[in-house]
Amino acid sequence: MELHVITRPEHPQLTFIRSLYESTFPVEERRLWHQFIQLLQEPAMQLNVVMDQGAAIGFVIGWKLGSWYYVEHLAIDPLQRGKKYGEKVMQSVLAAGYGRVILEVERAHDTNSQRRISFYERLGYTMVDIDYHQPPYRKGEAVLPMLLMSQPAITDGTEAKAIAGNIRASVYERYY
């Protein structure tokens, strides 16, 4: 398994990524595709396609925000799930983030959301103890109640709020 950075809007794997992105995340949890493509040149954002034996099997979108690496989206092709690809990707992300990674997850409201939380907990991520709402991707839309998880644990509430504010300003509001 390998991660390959995509920076060009004509990259051949973007068709696969778009299909997986739009089928995995509801519209309120993702950008419109043309907005997403514009971010490929953003220095802080990194889109990686996950490849295995020459085939695209997933993607991960991350942002370098100060001393933290923020994972915006991770998706593995449904036909490839259960094969430890997500775990391997997150190990690579942790290395890329120099051991400091933060991400959003849905609050536990069904089996799938609880499964995602458990996945990250098995990888050593812990809940960040603040009331967090994902800012909207488009101005005027509603915030989404979410949770933040991090590795290492963030135990200082002031630090947690500062990091959440940086995510809001750098990943969401900056692009309205």
Image (cartoon, helix red, strand yellow):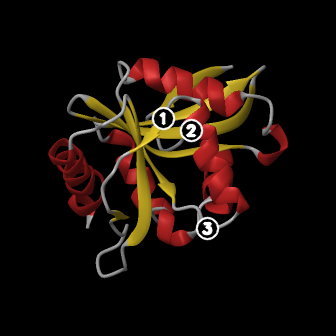
Give percent across and percent down for residue 10. Answer: 53, 42
Say which amino acid is labelled 1.
Tyr
SS at mark 1 in the image: loop
Q: What residue sits right under mark 1 in the picture?
A: 125
Mark 3 / mark 1, whichever is N-terminal: 3
Disc 2 versus disc 1: distance between alpha carbons?
5 Å
Name the residue at 35% across, 72% down: 138
Q: Quadrant of residue 127?
A: top left
Residue at screen point 23% across, 45% down: 163
Residue occupied by mark 2: 120
Report, in whole angstroms, how far the alpha carbon at label 2 lies from the one at label 3.
16 Å
At 69% from the left edge and 19% from the top edge, which residue is drawn?
A: 1
Q: Residue furthest right?
A: 79
One can see residue 11 in this view: no
- For the residue pair 114 and 84, the one nearer the viewer reads as 114
Question: Which numbered disc flags the more N-terminal residue, 2 or 1?
Answer: 2
Q: Give percent across and percent down for residue 133.
A: 35, 65
Say what amino acid the circle numbered 3 marks.
His
Give me the C-alpha separation between circle 3 and circle 1: 19 Å
Say whether marks 3 and 1 touch (CB < 8 Å).
no
Residue 7 position in % (x across, y down) = 43, 35
Q: Amino acid at mark 2?
A: Tyr
As drawn, is 109 to the left or to the right of 128?
right
Q: Quadrant of residue 130?
A: bottom left
Q: Is residue 133 above or below residue 7?
A: below
The residue sitting at 52% across, 21% down in the picture is 92
Tell me whether circle 2 and circle 1 mark residues in contact (CB < 8 Å).
Answer: yes
Question: Which residue does the numbered mark 3 point to in the structure image?
Answer: 109
